[in-house]
Image: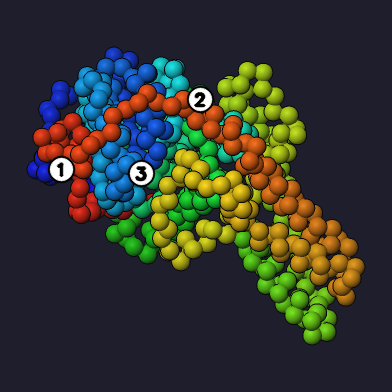
Amino acid sequence: MTPLTSASRMMHGVQDTVFAPVSSQSTTATIAFSFQLMTRAEPPEIVIATIKSLLAVKQAVDEILIIDNNHTDKSLYQPLAAFCESLDAALNVRFYHIDEIAGYKAGALNLALAWMDRRCSHIVVVDSDYEALPHAREAMVQAINDYPEHTLLQFPQFYRSAHLEDIHSELNHYFNHHLYQPRNRIRALSTGTYAVIRRRDLQQLGGWSGASITEDAQMGVLMHQHDMRSAFIPTVIATGLLPATLCDLLAQRQRWVYGNMQIFCRYLAAPLLRRLHPTYAASMATTKHSKAEQRRYQRAHLSQLSAWVNGTGILILLQLITVMLMALTLIVGHDSTWALPILAVIYAGYGVFLLRRLWAYLHDQAPLTQQMQRGYRHSIPKRLRTWLMHLNFWEVGALCWLPVLWGRQKPFVCTPKIAPDATQSALKHANRRALPKLLLILNALTALLVSPLSAAYSPILFVCALTVFGLKLIAARLALANYSTASEAEYLRSLSEPSAPFPLLNTEYVKPLNIQKMPFIKTTDRVQDKQTINF
């Protein structure tokens, strides 16, 4: 989207303010943060707890900007508005509600960029459930002073849902091991929450791009293509909540995989587009990096964008077709040994995937976990459990991104922060249904087709099929155990302490007189989706 004009800002109930220019040097004295929370139908008590944690660390020069968007449930956004209105104006907490914004989260972030206090030198993107730790601001200022020329400083994600230990370890493997590697640490893409971004550089890029449902990684790629620098800062400064159900966890992973592969495919297509479309090449940003440095950035980008993806999709589809044809030939009494070499190739590919992932998880030292839990020891059994937990996402990383290849778009799906209002029995059944079962079923059928009872018996393939079947079964049991009934009480304890009672709005709408204090925006005007793709 293009920045809003003064007239359009007044139409939306937002007044322009003239600020003194900010020095280009980010010294400790001039650092001011705009903490930006983009929320959508979130539980008010969780968002309020996050705001309170920011109030505990912010300084007078900082602001907190909350944009609640793309829903019309007054019971969820009016308590937030009432809480923000009850705060002292000197705290610089501003709340907006907008019924509809195009461009997913990027659309809301672009509004925040247009409406933020221009005295703030840096933007801090904060997820609605991520509560800042007491040292958060100090750590961010220290990082800015350590990396004064950097546009993006990405802090790690960490979780306070203590009972979901294996899920926590699997998710944090990206930060503990993947992003922790030197080649990625100094060329980090944004992962969203607690990304500290220099405001003037983001404005120079034209704001956030809505071309991918992972707007954070998209911004990181564009930033590097404009010779802007980034770094991963391995210091935990905030903690969030894990998805409350397996269904939500899988939906979150699908969004990450799909969005990153949207960027990945455009990245790979860029050289061809340069040759076919001269105007496309002319519009691209020109980098000053040497060829060797460009290759290092490319490797870092591809490494990070493909972190949640695996290349076994073609093998899974090939196994599905082979098993179907093999079963058919056995039923009609024809020879089916032709399928054995194909299955051997498939299982060789599976073996490479499993061993590569096992190697990565065995080499994960969990430095962030050790930072947060004194005396923590990431033992071999814990690493194996984390690897097994990762196998629950095997099909997701292999198959869910394939529609990207033919240009299919996928809606942005927010991750719920609390479990749905259902019985424990219903939640358990929902978790079982949500688990990917394709490989479980395929390998059970394959084991049957190559078993000693079959005319196409192969002892090696029989063992391979049983091994994959067994690994998937153990992984499923591990995931269900993490989300077991016994863990529910611990999950509830992992939530923040209930906030102090806050007033509810009695009015059905906010009167125009109060628009500056609680500027609700009800509009059918769709913010233009920003399609800034400069590969």
Closer to the chain start, of discs 3 and 1, is 1
Q: Where is residue 385 in the image (x, y as percent from the top left)?
A: 71, 39
- Coloring applied to the structure: rainbow
Closer to the chain start, of discs 2 and 1, is 1
Write down the residue under mark 2. Answer: 236
Q: Are marks 2 and 1 in contact (CB under 8 Å)?
A: no
The residues bearing labels 3 and 1 have C-alpha atoms spaced at a distance of: 19 Å
Amino acid marked by disc 3: Arg
Q: Nearer the viewer, mark 3 or mark 1?
A: 3
Q: Which mark is residue 12?
A: 1
Counting other residues with Cα less than 10 Å from the Cα at mark 3, is it few (<14), some (14-19), or many (20 or more)? many
The residues bearing labels 2 and 3 have C-alpha atoms spaced at a distance of: 25 Å
- Which residue of the protein is positioned furthest toward the top in this rendering? 29
370 or 491: nearer the viewer: 491
- The residue that appears at 54% across and 29% down in the rendered structure is 493
In the drawing, does residue 244 fall left or right of residue 518?
right
- The residue that appears at 49% across and 46% down in the rendered structure is 420
Helix, strand or loop under label 3:
loop
Q: Are marks 2 and 3 in contact (CB under 8 Å)?
A: no
User: Is 275 above or below relative to 107?
Assistant: below
Answer with the quarter of the image where residue 137 lies: top left
Q: Position of residue 282 (x, y in %)?
A: 30, 54
Write down the residue under mark 3. Answer: 40
